[in-house]
Structure formats: structure tokens, C-alpha cells
């Protein structure tokens, strides 16, 4: 029996090692390979090039409709570019090695230059070299011309700043090297001529990364005197969409995590389908629409826990919009969603206010903020920036006339990139009394400069900033296996720490704490019938949610690029939280600048192997704490 247990432990450890190496995105692009936890980064894609290199199409985020699966130490992406079906299988062979297999099948005759596995080299290779087995003389990358360089070889090694990429082929292969305005690109051929309908192409090659592993100690300096805005706590979205599986996920999250803010749906179209009806006459236990009642009960449950609540409408009844309601993705040239009908705007105001009054009278719920979801894009109500300004003033004033304390949420934008949508309202002093907070969703626009615009907007009119939907891939429901991957979990929590550090939001609302984008695994969700249990993403969220209540942001700075950090302190209790992403190898950490009143802190670590593992009694001497973090993990140093 003991040998069976030992074998099981060995297999568990081995599988964790194997599964943690390749950073494959679910649309088919490798962003690098990890060795000992350190990421050797590059960007790959599958690329179809037209005749004479006139144009090309590549796999990329939200450009195709891929399917992602894992089979042991293999990750598989099935996708299509035009009429070309592609299956990419990436096998992790450990120690920085991968075997890449590409299968291509044409659904029609295609006149093309070729199909390629393309590598875009990061800037660390700009002054490096390329060495082919067939040539004794290396090619200097900085001296490459704009002309395509073709190298026939069975092995190609690219050397940069303390890193190497090595490609190995079964047969001599003509690799194309291009020096472009965006840097150096390597084209590995899958097919280099026209492809006929029904023709199957297979190419396989090896890829190995090597180089220096950074194990230098990381120094993080915090400054409790440099204080910013307040973080009330982590929150969640609770839009009910999956009746069979939502309840158990919601129960688990609310019972096992401190959730400080909530966002629920107003099913506007179901609330008042007919313009001349009086929705206030509906009986909550009788003729009230089932989805409306369940959404109100969800708000009631969150209210009883003590959360402020955002009420958001994803739709509107036919009488309140222009045209037939359409919720599907638009065809090329079409717009998302429907505009509100200006002729019925007063009736729209009344219906929304009636919903909030009904919630208060029948369910005891006070709504803090109201919004239309992603109205900049039209999911599913579309509003112009100027209409958004008018809506905030009009509906905000109507709330006041009805004696409601509910305020308007400025923005609630689809992405951080669409910040100009809020500018008319931001610069309108008449709108300010009705704005309770500013909100954006974190699906796109993660550049520091872009995120800073939202922080600046909130400071300009002195209202809280909210990340209304937090996560990293709006299309991930199409390939839900990605939710169990370390790649997704680390990228998601890394973004959250950057949002804390740059934007200083009052809350980040996870999309979602339901079965949709579930942080839990099994329970029939996404067809997985394992017993319901938390995954790495859940432990990341729970650990972040353990930040002391009503903490104030303080400055924190690490001395290495592959470490993300954010720090907070409760000014009344002196409770502190220092959150860290160790996005590299196992390393020692030295945190300085901690309050000298602290003598011991608690360290929590989440990774593929550790689920919010607690390490008590981290000693603090003269405001300094020392500890070691394992490779690729999320760590939080907290007051117990």
C-alpha cells in the first residue's frame, strides 16, 4: 500500500512539473516556455501568407473560434483560418523542451505562399545571433536587411540576452527570417505552395529554450506613509444564467470567501414587457417573472451579507428601444445592440425606478448604483457618449424625484480602451451630482498608460473607481478547459495586482462568482462531472479577498521586472497586506518598509501545487521581512 501511495505522490509531482512548462494561449499562440519557473518568452502564431507575401492572416485572440483541450502533457488547439482547418498539438517534454505538431487540412483549393509557424522575437534578441547547423557563420540579427533570409537547415539556434531558442527538424527545412518594423520574425514552413481541397499537411519539430535562470533575491520596498485611495474589498458578479449549476457555485463562493461588493442583473425586458403595464402591481410570489424574481432574490441575499449592490441592465423591452431586439454578434458592418427610444425615455426612467422601488418594498434591498452594461459597445443597449451624459443627468434626476438614493455608474465600459466614452459626462458639471462611481471592465486595455486614464478620471471628480467585470478573456467560455491552466490563473491575478497598483479601485468584481467563467471545477459545469472543488483561480481570488477590510493603498515597488506587487494598510488597525506575483524561479524575498509595530506576519501562497498554503510567523525585524517563494506563485503577506 505504501508503495502505491508513493507512486501516486510521484505522479502528482511529475504531472505538476510537466503541466507547468508551456505557455500556450487557447487560440494557438505560444507566449513562451518555462524552465525552472522562469519564462523564456516569445510570441508564436500560425500564419497563412498570400501569394508574393502581399498579406497574411494569423491566429490571435478573438480572431477565430478555437477549441482548446488538454490531454496529459499535451495541449491541443483546433481552429481555422479562412478555409484552412488547423490542429496544433504542443507536447511538454520537460526541462524547457517542447514537441510541436501542426496538421492542416484545406476545405477548398487555396492559392497561397504558404502556411507557417511564425515566431516574433522579443527585443532581448535584437542584438543576438542566429546559427544554422548548415552554416559555420552566425547571422547577426541587428544587421539583417529587409530582404527575406532563407536558411536550409535541420537545426536553428537563436541566441539573445542570456537566452536561447533552438529549433530541431527531422529533415532539412528552409526557414525564412524576416526583419520587419516590428522586429525579427522566424517563419517555419508547414506548407510552401498552393494547397488543394482535402489535402492534409503535417509538420513536426522540436523547440528548446535554455539560458540563465534568474534566482537573484527580490527586494520590495513599501511605504505606509505614501497613502492613496481605499479598497473596500474584492467583489463579484452574480448574473444568473445557468439555473442547474449556478446555485452550488454561488453557495461555495459566498460561504468560503469574503465578498465585499456585488453586481446583479435587472432583467428589464422581462420586468415590464408592455409599456402601459404597471409592474409595481406584480405579486412576487405569483405573477412576477421567474428570472426577475430570482434576480431580486440574488440581490436580497447579497444585501443581507452587507454588500453594496450595483444593479445592471443587459437588455431593455421592445418599447424602450429602436428596432427589433438583437443579442447576437453582429455581422460585418453592423453594430451591436439597440439604441434607447428617445420618445419613450420618461417611461424608461419610470420603469427602472419602479424596479428599484419594488426591490426595496418587497425584498428590502437598497441599490447603490445603476448602469446599462457595456453601452459603449452595445451589450445589449447601445448609447453614444453624449446620450450617456444625458442619461446620467436625466435618470439620476428622476431617481432623486422618486426619493431614491441610487446613483448612476459612469461608464461600465466594455474595456479600458474606450475611456473617451466617459469624457462628455466627466467634463459636465451638471452630471456630477448623479455619479456614484466610475466603472470599466478589464477584458482589454492593460497598458499602464491606458489604465492610468481611469484612475485620473476617478480622481478628477472624486468618486470611487470600480472594475465592474474582472478577468482576462471575454471569449474563454468557448474553451473552458483554459480555466484550469496555470497560464490563465497567473495572468488573471497578475492583472488584478496591476489594477490595484495603477488604478486603486474601491473593488474588483470578478466575472463571475457563478457557473459562468466559474472559479470552481466539476459539479457538471462545462460538462465536467467531477465533484465540485476549488481550482487555482478560486484560491487566488480567496487570497486576494483576504485583504484587510477598508484598506488604503500604499506604494510598493519591486526591483525586478517579473515581479508584480501591490500593498495596502488599514489606517485604524495597522493591518497590512503585501501581494506579490513571483512570475519566475524560486527566489528569496526581502520586504522592507513594513510598520515597525508588526513583529510577525502570515504568508499565504497559491500555485499549481499550493492552495493558499499558510506559513505562519514570518518575523518582522525593524520593518523588514525575509522569506522564500516557490516558482510561479501568488503570495500575500498579511497581518493575521
Image: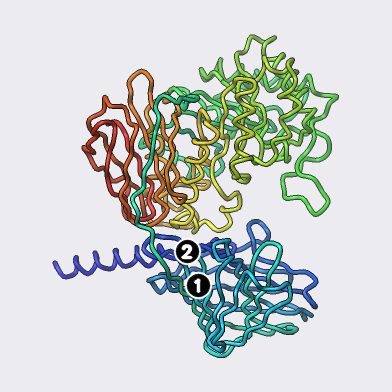
Q: In which quarter of the image is residue 287?
A: top right
Q: Mark 2 points at which residue?
A: 40
Residue 9 image position (x, y, % from top left): 24, 64
Foreground residue, 272 or 615?
A: 615
Q: Earlier in the sequence, mark 1 or mark 2?
A: 2
On the rendered structure, is 541 left or right of 101? left
Q: Can residue 239 be seen in this view?
A: yes
Q: In this view, does 82 lie to the left or right of 5?
A: right
Residue 248 visible? The answer is: no
Q: Residue at x 23, y 38 (%)?
A: 618
The residue closer to the viewer here, 591 or 294, is 591
Please name the residue shown 44% across and 69% down the image: 71
| The quarter of the displayed image where residue 275 is located | top right
The residue at which mark 1 appears reads as 165
Residue 42 screen position, x and y as percent: 55, 64
> Dot 1: what SS?
strand
SS assignment at label 2: strand
Q: Position of residue 640 (x, y in %)?
A: 27, 31
Quadrant where the image shows the N terminus: bottom left
Vertical relation: 160 (above or below) 606 = below
Counting from the top left corner in percent of width and height, residue 496 is at 49, 41
Of residues 148 and 569, the one nearer the viewer is 148
Tell me the tag on residue 408: none
Amino acid at each position: 500500500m505504501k508503495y502505491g501511495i508513493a507512486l501516486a505522490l510521484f505522479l502528482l509531482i511529475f504531472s505538476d512539473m510537466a503541466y507547468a512548462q508551456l505557455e500556450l494561449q487557447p487560440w494557438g499562440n505560444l507566449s513562451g516556455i518555462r524552465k525552472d519557473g522562469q519564462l523564456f518568452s516569445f510570441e508564436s502564431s500560425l500564419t497563412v501568407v498570400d501569394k508574393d507575401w502581399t498579406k497574411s492572416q494569423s491566429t490571435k485572440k478573438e480572431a477565430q473560434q478555437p477549441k482548446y483541450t488538454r490531454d496529459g502533457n499535451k495541449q491541443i488547439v483546433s481552429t481555422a483560418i479562412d478555409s484552412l482547418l488547423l490542429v496544433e498539438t504542443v507536447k511538454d517534454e520537460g526541462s524547457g523542451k517542447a514537441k510541436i505538431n501542426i496538421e492542416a487540412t484545406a476545405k477548398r483549393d487555396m492559392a497561397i505562399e504558404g502556411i507557417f509557424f511564425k515566431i516574433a522575437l522579443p527585443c532581448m534578441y535584437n542584438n543576438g545571433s542566429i546559427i544554422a547547423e548548415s552554416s559555420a557563420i552566425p547571422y547577426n540579427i541587428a544587421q539583417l536587411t529587409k530582404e527575406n533570409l532563407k536558411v536550409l537547415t535541420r537545426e536553428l539556434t537563436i541566441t539573445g540576452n542570456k537566452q536561447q531558442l533552438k529549433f530541431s527538424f527531422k529533415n532539412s527545412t528552409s526557414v525564412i527570417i524576416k526583419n520587419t518594423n516590428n522586429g525579427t520574425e522566424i517563419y517555419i514552413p508547414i506548407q510552401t505552395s498552393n494547397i488543394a481541397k482535402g489535402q492534409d499537411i503535417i509538420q513536426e519539430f522540436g523547440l528548446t529554450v535554455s539560458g540563465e535562470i534568474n534566482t537573484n533575491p527580490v527586494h520590495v520596498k513599501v511605504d505606509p506613509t505614501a497613502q492613496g485611495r481605499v479598497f473596500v474589498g474584492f467583489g463579484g458578479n452574480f448574473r444568473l444564467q445557468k439555473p442547474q449549476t449556478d446555485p452550488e457555485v454561488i453557495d461555495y463562493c459566498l460561504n468560503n470567501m469574503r465578498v465585499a461588493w456585488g453586481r446583479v442583473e435587472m432583467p428589464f425586458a422581462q420586468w415590464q414587457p408592455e409599456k402601459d403595464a404597471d409592474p409595481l402591481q406584480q405579486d412576487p410570489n405569483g405573477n412576477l417573472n421567474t428570472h426577475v424574481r430570482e434576480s431580486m432574490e440574488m440581490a436580497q441575499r447579497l444585501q443581507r451579507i452587507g454588500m453594496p449592490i450595483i444593479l445592471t441592465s443587459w437588455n431593455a423591452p421592445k418599447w424602450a428601444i429602436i428596432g427589433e431586439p438583437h443579442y447576437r454578434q453582429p455581422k460585418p458592418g453592423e453594430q451591436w445592440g439597440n439604441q434607447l427610444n428617445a420618445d419613450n425615455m420618461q417611461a424608461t426612467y419610470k420603469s427602472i425606478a419602479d424596479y428599484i422601488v419594488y426591490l426595496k418594498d418587497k425584498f428590502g434591498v437598497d441599490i447603490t448604483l445603476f448602469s446599462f452594461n457595456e453601452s459603449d459597445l452595445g451589450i445589449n443597449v447601445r448609447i453614444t457618449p453624449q446620450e450617456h451624459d444625458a442619461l446620467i443627468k436625466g435618470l439620476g434626476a428622476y431617481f432623486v424625484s422618486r426619493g431614491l438614493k441610487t446613483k448612476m455608474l459612469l461608464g461600465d465600459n466594455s474595456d479600458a480602451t474606450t475611456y473617451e466614452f466617459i469624457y462628455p459626462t466627466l467634463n459636465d458639471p451638471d452630471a456630477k451630482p448623479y455619479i456614484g462611481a466610475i466603472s470599466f471592465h478589464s477584458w482589454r486595455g492593460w497598458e499602464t498608460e491606458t489604465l492610468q486614464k481611469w484612475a485620473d478620471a476617478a480622481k478628477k471628480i472624486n468618486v470611487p473607481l470600480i472594475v465592474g467585470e474582472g478577468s482576462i478573456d471575454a471569449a474563454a467560455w468557448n474553451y473552458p478547459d483554459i480555466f484550469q491552466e496555470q497560464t490563465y490563473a497567473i495572468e488573471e491575478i497578475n492583472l488584478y495586482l496591476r489594477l490595484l497598483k495603477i488604478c486603486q479601485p474601491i473593488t474588483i468584481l470578478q466575472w463571475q462568482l457563478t457557473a459562468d467563467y466559474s472559479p470552481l471545477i466539476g459539479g457538471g459545469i462545462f460538462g465536467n462531472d467531477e465533484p465540485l472543488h476549488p481550482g487555482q483561480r478560486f484560491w487566488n481570488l480567496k487570497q486576494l479577498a483576504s485583504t484587510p477590510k477598508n484598506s488604503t493603498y500604499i506604494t510598493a515597488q519591486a526591483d525586478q521586472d517579473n515581479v508584480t506587487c501591490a500593498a495596502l494598510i488599514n489606517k485604524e488597525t495597522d493591518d497590512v497586506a503585501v501581494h506579490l506575483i513571483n512570475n519566475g524561479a524560486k527566489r528569496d524575498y526581502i520586504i522592507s518598509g513594513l510598520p515597525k509595530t508588526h513583529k510577525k506576519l502570515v504568508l499565504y501562497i497559491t500555485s499549481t501545487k499550493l492552495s493558499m498554503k499558510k506559513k505562519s510567523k514570518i518575523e518582522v525585524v525593524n520593518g523588514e521581512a525575509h522569506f522564500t517563494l516557490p516558482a510561479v506563485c501568488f503570495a500575500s503577506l498579511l497581518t493575521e
